[in-house]
Image: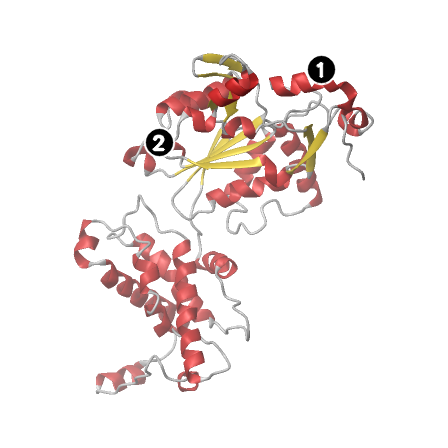
């Protein structure tokens, strides 16, 4: 289908009639979501472990046309879920060409678009915006200002155009107006200053803001989605009550509930296929790696408020695989087979991701990381061989027997 390039051509398409004409972005997401549900298509491809817990809450919030916040610790796929929301937008939508705020040709909100329509009429040029261009994301920091999110007066625009500073055409729009007719996501919301949060809830509730003291009416059409870490409420800031009251749904995320789900996520996200022969990763090695994260989350020396990110087992697997790859190339082997001993080579991937309590700091991250690996390996061994009669083997070691396989020996010795 050829996309119309002028307003006159656009009037002869379904975009000029209900339900497409005048449809808000939240209605658009709601309609496309219902189509996805009816078809049975996956809503959030690649999101594992949330099918029965988090995703139903997100679906309900979107069907209710709510702004929402995902509240959870590090490494719980919060930002990834928000980016996946673009799959619920239309593939392309028409806008007034040149508009900074993605003006709807039939319901423009900016002075630029209104003047363009008045001047050009049916010949007003139309541009088309893809779904990925309709997602705007901002990482909140304490130094983010109203100008960054909402906008500011641009004296250069005023001088070049001969406009008064109070003229809307002198405004340099921030990220939020540029997300009009799309999704605006803010990560780590509590880090925003109270003043900026006030500007956000004015947009959510009233649709207007003041830029440098000048009132500018901006009836924005946007879905607001936020993420936050519970630790941030006390460590760095908080969400002000009026803004929190205007967020329709607060959805609490979690880490994988089972080791098997964690392994599935880790294998999915880790860089495993590196060219050449695919590596052979024994199941028990994967399980030990995943259990390291589970053990860390239960360890009293690790700060529970900070959490243990799912990125930890992903990084550990990649580093263990790299150690096996290095050994394989050095020895001229044709297969890459990581061992439990390779997990110890991934200690740097563990220590950098653990926030330790005072007791843990005294012992040191390296000591704790190695202990976590030993405990994880012990639990996997116990689960897999708990019913086996190991008395003779234990007696052999008790009598001074030893079995040593150097980390740089060929894989055949481990068979």
Identify residue for label 1: 118
Q: Position of residue 68 (x, y in %)?
A: 50, 31
Query: How many marks overall?
Result: 2
From the viewer's perspective, is the residue at label 2 or at label 1 nearer? 1
**Mark 1 burial class by Cα count in 10 Å: few <14, some 14-19, many 20+:** few
Asked which colour scheme the image uses, the reply is secondary structure
Q: Earlier in the sequence, mark 2 or mark 1?
A: 1
Q: Secondary structure at mark 1?
A: helix
On screen, residue 349 above or below 59:
below
How far apart in space, not on screen, are marks 2 and 1 (Cα)? Answer: 40 Å
On screen, residue 185 above or below 306:
above
On screen, residue 229 above or below 393:
above
Determine the residue positioned at 62% across, 42% down.
87
Q: Is residue 221 left or right of residue 336?
A: right
Determine the residue positioned at 78% across, 21% down.
122
Which residue ends up furthest to the left in the rendered image?
362
Determine the residue positioned at 44% across, 52% down.
257
Question: Which quarter of the figure has residue 22?
Answer: top right
Q: Position of residue 76 (x, y in %)?
A: 44, 47
Identify residue for label 2: 143
Quadrant occupied by the N terminus = top right
Quadrant occupied by the C terminus = bottom left
Question: Which quarter of the figure has residue 294?
Answer: bottom left
Q: Is residue 204 visible?
A: no
Q: Is residue 47 visible?
A: yes
Say which of 148 and 115 sits in front.
115
Determine the residue positioned at 50% across, 66% down.
272
Q: Position of residue 223 (x, y in %)?
A: 55, 30
Q: Is residue 404 left or right of residue 284?
A: left
Q: Secondary structure at mark 2?
A: loop
Kindly check if marks 2 and 1 are in contact, taking CB atoms under 8 A apart as contact. Answer: no
Which residue ends up furthest to the right in the rendered image?
12
């Amino acid at each position: 289908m050829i996309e119309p390039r002028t307003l006159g051509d656009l009037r002869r398409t379904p975009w000029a009639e209900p339900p497409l004409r005048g449809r808000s972005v939240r209605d658009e997401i709601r309609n496309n979501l219902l189509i996805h549900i009816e078809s049975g298509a996956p809503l959030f491809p690649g999101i594992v472990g949330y099918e029965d817990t988090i995703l139903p809450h997100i679906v309900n919030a979107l069907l209710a046309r709510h702004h929402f916040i995902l509240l959870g610790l590090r490494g719980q796929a919060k930002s990834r879920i928000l980016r996946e929301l673009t799959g619920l937008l239309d593939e392309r939508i028409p806008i007034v060409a040149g508009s900074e705020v993605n003006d709807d040709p039939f319901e423009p909100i900016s002075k630029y678009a209104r003047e363009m329509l008045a001047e050009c009429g049916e010949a007003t040029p139309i541009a088309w915006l893809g779904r990925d261009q309709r997602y705007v994301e901002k990482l909140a920091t304490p130094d983010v200002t109203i100008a960054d999110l909402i906008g500011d007066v641009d004296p250069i625009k005023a001088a070049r155009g001969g406009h008064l500073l109070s003229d809307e055409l002198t405004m340099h729009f921030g990220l939020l107006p540029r997300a009009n007719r799309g999704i605006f996501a803010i990560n780590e919301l509590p880090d925003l200053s109270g003043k900026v949060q006030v500007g956000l809830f004015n947009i959510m509730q009233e649709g207007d803001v003041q830029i440098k003291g000048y009132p500018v009416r901006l009836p924005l059409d946007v879905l607001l989605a936020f993420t936050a870490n519970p630790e941030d409420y006390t460590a760095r800031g908080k969400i002000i009550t009026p803004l929190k009251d205007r967020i329709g749904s607060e959805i609490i995320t979690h880490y994988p509930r089972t080791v098997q789900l964690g392994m599935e996520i880790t294998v999915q996200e880790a860089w495993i296929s590196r060219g050449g022969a695919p590596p052979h990763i024994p199941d028990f090695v994967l399980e030990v790696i995943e259990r390291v994260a589970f053990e860390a989350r239960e360890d009293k020396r690790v700060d529970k408020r900070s959490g243990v990110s799912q990125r930890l087992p992903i990084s550990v697997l990649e580093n263990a695989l790299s150690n096996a790859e290095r050994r394989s190339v050095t020895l001229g082997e044709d297969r890459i087979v990581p061992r439990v001993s390779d997990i110890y080579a991934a200690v740097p991937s563990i220590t950098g991701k653990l926030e330790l309590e005072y007791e843990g700091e005294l012992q040191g991250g390296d000591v704790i990381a190695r202990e976590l690996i030993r405990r994880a390996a012990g639990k996997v061994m116990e689960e897999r061989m708990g019913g086996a009669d190991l008395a003779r083997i234990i007696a052999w070691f008790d009598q001074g027997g030893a079995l040593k396989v150097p980390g740089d020996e060929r894989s055949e010795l481990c068979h």
